[in-house]
Image (cartoon, helix red, strand yellow):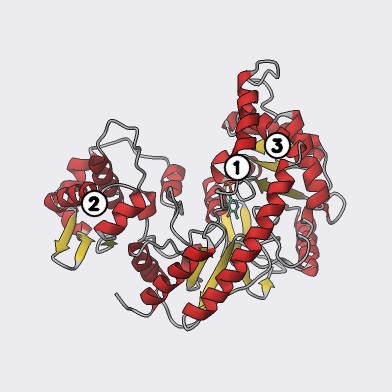
Amino acid sequence: MADTNYPLDLLRLDKSSAEPLHLQIRNGLRAMILDGRLKSRTRVPSIRNLARTLQVSRNTVVSAIDQLVAEGYLESRPGAGCWVTDTHALSSVGIRARAGGSMPSLSTRGDLMSRQALIQGQPHQAAFHPGVPETESFPFKVWGRILKRKSASSGDDLFGYHTIAGLYDLRVAIAEYLTVSRGLNCVADQIVPTTGAQAALDFLARMLIDEQDAVMMENPGFLGARSAFLAAGARLVELPVDECGWHPVQRPPNHPKLIYLTPSCQHPLGMTMPLEQRLEILEIARRDEAWIIEDDYDGEYNFFGDPVPAMQGLVEDAPVIYVGTFSKVLFPSLRIGYAVVPPDLAKKARAVLSFTGQHPSLVLQATLAEFMSAGHFSRHLNRMRRLYARRRKAFLEFCDTYVSEWLKPLDERTGIQIACKAVVPMDDLGIAAQAADRGLSLVPLSYYGLAGSAKSGFVMGYAAVPEDKMEEAFKTLRSVLSGEV
Ligand SMILES: Cc1ncc(COP(=O)(O)O)c(C=O)c1O
């Protein structure tokens, strides 16, 4: 795994806070420098770009940056921008100790988790941030009407501590949807609603993994799953993936306790796992008595034919736990996802989940249940499929016109993001930092690999970029890749 030298998207501002924005920016950047997330010599985006990305005035950014320069955290050269000061120099003059104070230490797990690479978007997302759906077309009026009704009436009894198991109506709606659209073999009792797929991965890891258990994990693979398994004490065993598919090691040196897969839309490369490989991995899982977690975060969008049915429904009694989310089909901040567990595990799963507190708000569950049962969900999904098909086509055409000398899209069939492989040697982290200065959000492909196996390129979202803005964004990307300033 390559180092994170591009974490400025972690800077969070709270505009409702009494703390002035320039202090929030200064404190945020200072904390990232001190804890090493922002490495020495990292270039800071331009004032213009920071102001635009953070949605603040240039004066606010200038004031924060000036202060950090004055305090010695940043160096600036006229006309050349700003860099993070050499951090050895910082510690040698004792700035670290003064700013951080002495705090009790984190647990090994907490420290490990806090150091994992984190990819998060910003409000008013810049072009090509991956994994974000278009929200402008969401039927907010309909949603708002249902939400208002559900929040206003105590008749449904949505306001207590009960129903941590998940609202029955929502579990029924999800089970029906998954049976019809995703080919699952499940009933409402097996659905465990969570606050998103990440929460499902976290509670499943805690429930299924012991210290030093082997977890077979796709490489390149989803960073959120990696962190959840590492935090549970797992030893990660690589499951190599490339454009040609998954290459499971037939006789891994240690039996895996769990195999994590994104078979409908490999994260981040985008391929769909062929049937023979699904059956092969199911066979390995049965032989080694391993669980499979099938993370189907983005399988609803398939642009060549119907979505491929899930592994969970492929064979009777498969040891598969299916994980899904509404983040990509509705919107990410809804924070509703779910696990579909085998019937024998359902009661224990609910008990474990209740101690993690990662169950979604009942009011939101009730709103979503009605949104689904009244047909709004499937209508929205169909509309978005058509919209994304158009945007995907535009993305591939612009990609060919403007950046084909550097990047080749892995034009696979599914998902709301596209992995683009570098076709020439490329420092993708450096290019992503330069692109961020120009208002683009590219996630380097080399982020996603386990140590030593990183590939170069970018994962690029297209779903939330209207076609007219997309062409401009590609022109900007071309000028970054060709080294024009
Ligand atoms: C592969 C994969 N799994 C799970 C998630 C988490 O989704 P959620 O927003 O439901 O936590 C994501 C988010 O992008 C993802 O890419």
Disc 1 Cβ-to-ligand 1 distance below 8 Å: yes
Say which residue label 2 marks: 58
Three-letter code, disc 2: Arg
Q: Position of residue 144 (x, y in %)?
A: 60, 33
The front one of 116 and 25 is 25
In the visual, does 468 lie left or right of 169? left
The residue positioned 64% from the left and 52% from the top of the image is 297
Asked if residue 462 can be seen in this view, the reply is yes
- Give the structural element (helix, strand or loop) at label 1: loop
Closest to the observer, 367 or 353:
367
The three-letter code of the residue at mark 1 reads Gly
Q: Residue furthest top?
A: 154
Q: Is residue 238 visible?
A: no
Q: Please name the amino acid that badge 3 sits on.
A: Phe
Q: Nearer the viewer, mark 3 or mark 1?
A: 3
Q: Which mark is residue 196?
A: 1
User: Eyeballing the image, is 479 above or below 391?
Assistant: below
**Mark 1 closeness class: few <14, some 14–19, many ≥20 residues within 10 Å:** many
Instruction: Give the Cα distance between marks 3 and 1.
Output: 18 Å
x and y, in percent, of residue 367 in the image:
66, 31
Residue on which disc 3 sits: 371
Secondary structure of the residue carrying numbered label 3: helix
- Marks 1 and 2 sit apart, C-alpha to C-alpha, by 36 Å
